[in-house]
């Protein structure tokens, strides 16, 4: 249906160096370029590995169509929180990004949309002021230009190193999602592994359409915390995408290889009315 | 004088205090002719959240308050004040009713957080909170939220999207509990006092950060006196907010949260 994926939109990035990546599920080692070409799905066992924000965008958007927005908004350390400045530096090196979310405008099969992709390589995609601000701005600009929003979500939750500021980003982004929705625009959330805490309790669950990747961990409270607090044994598949589908909290689970097709289809279904 | 870290953690201890009044106290004392309404009309009724209608001075309001109870038996029944998804959905149902009948809404917040358990996850704890944030941003009636005890993360924020945010002097409001923070940071929950300090979770911090609009002094005042001061402030705020055209009210609510955050 759609051709070979192009990974050359973002040049000279750390991820373009070839190294072997080990599958956490089966232990198979695959060269990173081959793995990337296989959409970070282990060729041996089919396990989904986490994708960086830029790989994610490359996977679904039309080549050359991406226009990044608010690229330079970055975190500061408003509370002088112990170890935060060092963690930010390490996260930048680790992910090759300035912040844990990449935002912009792009086309998917020729249809214009606003997109954001979070990156679990940047402090587990946690949301502090900068991530909240970038996503809020994206919804605001999409509202102004009447664009649908597609969000690729992965996050451990609100970033504790920014204290109350992080918690309040949940309300701030929710307000922007609401305004975008009130203006009649479409928001599709794609939940990927992991989506937890304050992100699940805000914009991850506010999509008109909520798609999840197979086996993605999606929940509010941490599984270990639940086990420790309640002493209950967690059922098999707890907080996985399939569990949420069964309990009625997501619209569908989509294969990564079909994601572009499905997103493009959804966009098309929202472009023409009777 | 206390060291700084004792200061922040002392507030946490006070905010959680065994006999500190929670939502139920303020509702009973502040609201006349209160009628409690139960249930989310979806699944169940959550005793950790009390909701209903009554008169504030002589005008109708919808009130919602987190309550953990006094006796052990009551605390078990109320899940120690940790709301389940049904609690948040009940709150939202009552808030929508308030919007329909143009009643202002008062929320009292005091809970260590949203209930953490298998059933709560099954029934969409995250979705329930997300829905409240989304809906409260657009509710066409004034909302006043008061942190009376511990404002525990997303579970507190689910009643905290508002036009006026108030904290009692010895209440706290945080993205994560100091114990949770300490065990992540230092793998040692006994370092909670240091974490409390690092998190900047006191009412005074939040006022300085412009996250809240007002601190109600507690000092050596009795609970009755605190409640009376709070009541006067709430009445004043509702009167102010009720004068605003709905569009302005919603714009200001959006801006209130829109401006929070510090980045480079």
Image (tube, helix red, strand yellow):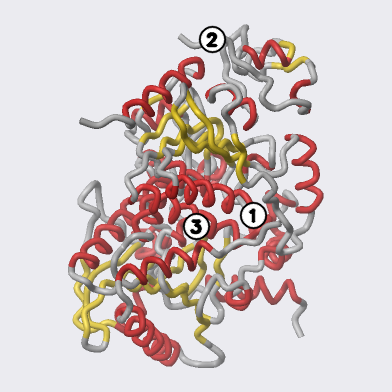
Disc on res. A160: 1
Counting from the top left corner in percent of width and height, residue B112 is at 50, 61
Question: Which one is in front in this view, the residue at disc 1 or the one at disc 2?
Answer: 2
Q: Quadrant of the N terminus of chain B?
A: bottom right
User: At x 48% / y 33%, what residue is drawn?
Assistant: A191
The image quadrant of residue B69 is bottom left
Residue B97 to residue A72: above or below: below
Disc 1 to disc 3, C-alpha distance: 16 Å
Q: Are marks 3 and 2 on the same chain?
A: yes
Counting from the top left corner in percent of width and height, residue A209 is at 37, 34
Tag 2, which chain?
Answer: A
User: At x 78% / y 26%, what residue is drawn?
Assistant: A12
Q: Which mark is first along the chain, 2 or 3?
A: 2
Residue B63 to residue A248: above or below: below
User: At x 79% / y 16%, what residue is drawn?
Assistant: A18
Tag 3, which chain?
Answer: A
Between A21 and A226, the one nearer to me in the picture: A21
- Total numbered labels: 3
Q: Are marks 1 and 2 on the same chain?
A: yes
Q: Which mark is first along the chain, 3 or 1?
A: 1
Q: Which mark is first along the chain, 2 or 1?
A: 2
Counting from the top left corner in percent of width and height, residue A22 is at 72, 17
**Helix, strand or loop under label 1:** helix
Residue annotated with mark 2: A3
User: At x 50% / y 85%, what residue is drawn?
Assistant: B216
Asked if labels 2 and 1 touch by Cβ distance under 8 angstroms, the answer is no
Residue annotated with mark 3: A172
Q: Quadrant of the C terminus of chain B?
A: bottom right
């Amino acid at each position: 249906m759609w051709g070979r994926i192009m990974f050359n939109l973002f040049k000279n990035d750390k991820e373009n160096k070839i190294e072997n990546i080990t599958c956490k599920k089966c232990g198979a080692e695959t060269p990173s370029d081959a793995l990337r070409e296989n959409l970070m799905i282990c060729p041996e066992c089919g396990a989904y590995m986490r994708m960086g924000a830029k790989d994610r965008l490359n996977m679904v958007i039309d080549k050359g169509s991406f226009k990044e927005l608010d690229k330079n908004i970055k975190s500061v350390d408003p509370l002088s929180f112990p170890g935060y400045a060092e963690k930010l530096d390490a996260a930048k090196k680790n992910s090759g990004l300035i912040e844990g979310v990449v935002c912009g405008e792009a086309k998917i099969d020729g249809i214009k949309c606003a997109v954001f992709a979070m990156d679990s390589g940047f402090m587990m995609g946690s949301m502090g002021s900068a991530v909240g601000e970038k996503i809020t701005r994206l919804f605001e600009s999409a509202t102004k230009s009447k664009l649908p929003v597609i969000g690729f979500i992965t996050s451990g939750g609100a970033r504790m190193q920014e204290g109350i500021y992080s918690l309040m980003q949940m309300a701030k982004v929710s307000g922007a999602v609401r305004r975008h929705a009130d203006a009649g625009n479409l928001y599709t959330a794609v939940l990927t592994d992991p989506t937890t805490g304050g992100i699940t309790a805000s914009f991850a669950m506010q999509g008109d359409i909520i798609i999840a990747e197979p086996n993605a961990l999606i929940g509010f409270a941490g599984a270990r915390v639940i086990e420790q607090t309640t002493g209950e044994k967690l059922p098999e598949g707890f907080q996985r995408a399939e569990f949420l589908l069964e309990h009625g909290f997501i619209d569908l689970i989509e294969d990564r290889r079909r994601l572009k097709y499905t997103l493009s289809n959804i966009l098309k279904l929202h472009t023409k009315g009777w | 004088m206390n060291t700084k870290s004792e200061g922040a953690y002392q507030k946490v201890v006070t905010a959680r205090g065994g006999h500190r009044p929670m939502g139920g106290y303020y509702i009973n004392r502040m609201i006349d002719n209160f009628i409690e309404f139960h249930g989310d009309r979806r699944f169940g009724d959550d005793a950790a959240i009390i909701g209903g209608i009554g008169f504030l001075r002589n005008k109708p309001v919808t009130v919602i308050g987190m309550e953990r109870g006094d006796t052990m038996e009551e605390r078990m029944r109320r899940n120690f004040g940790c709301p389940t998804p049904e609690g948040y959905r009940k709150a939202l149902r009552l808030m929508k009713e308030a919007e329909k009948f143009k009643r202002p809404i008062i929320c009292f917040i005091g809970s260590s957080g949203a209930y953490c358990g298998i059933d709560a996850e099954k029934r969409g704890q995250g979705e329930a909170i997300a829905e409240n944030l989304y809906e409260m941003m657009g509710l066409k009636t004034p909302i006043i939220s008061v942190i009376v005890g511990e404002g525990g993360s997303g579970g507190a924020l689910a009643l905290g999207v508002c036009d006026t945010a108030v904290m009692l002097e010895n209440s706290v409001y945080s993205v994560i509990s100091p114990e949770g923070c300490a065990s992540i940071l230092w793998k040692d929950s006994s370092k909670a006092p240091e974490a409390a300090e690092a998190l900047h979770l006191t009412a005074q911090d939040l006022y300085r950060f412009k996250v809240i609009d007002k601190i109600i002094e507690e000092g050596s005042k009795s609970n009755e006196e605190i409640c009376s001061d709070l009541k006067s402030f709430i009445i004043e705020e509702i009167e102010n907010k009720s004068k605003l055209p709905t569009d302005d009210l919603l714009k200001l609510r959006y801006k209130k949260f829109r401006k929070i955050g510090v980045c480079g």
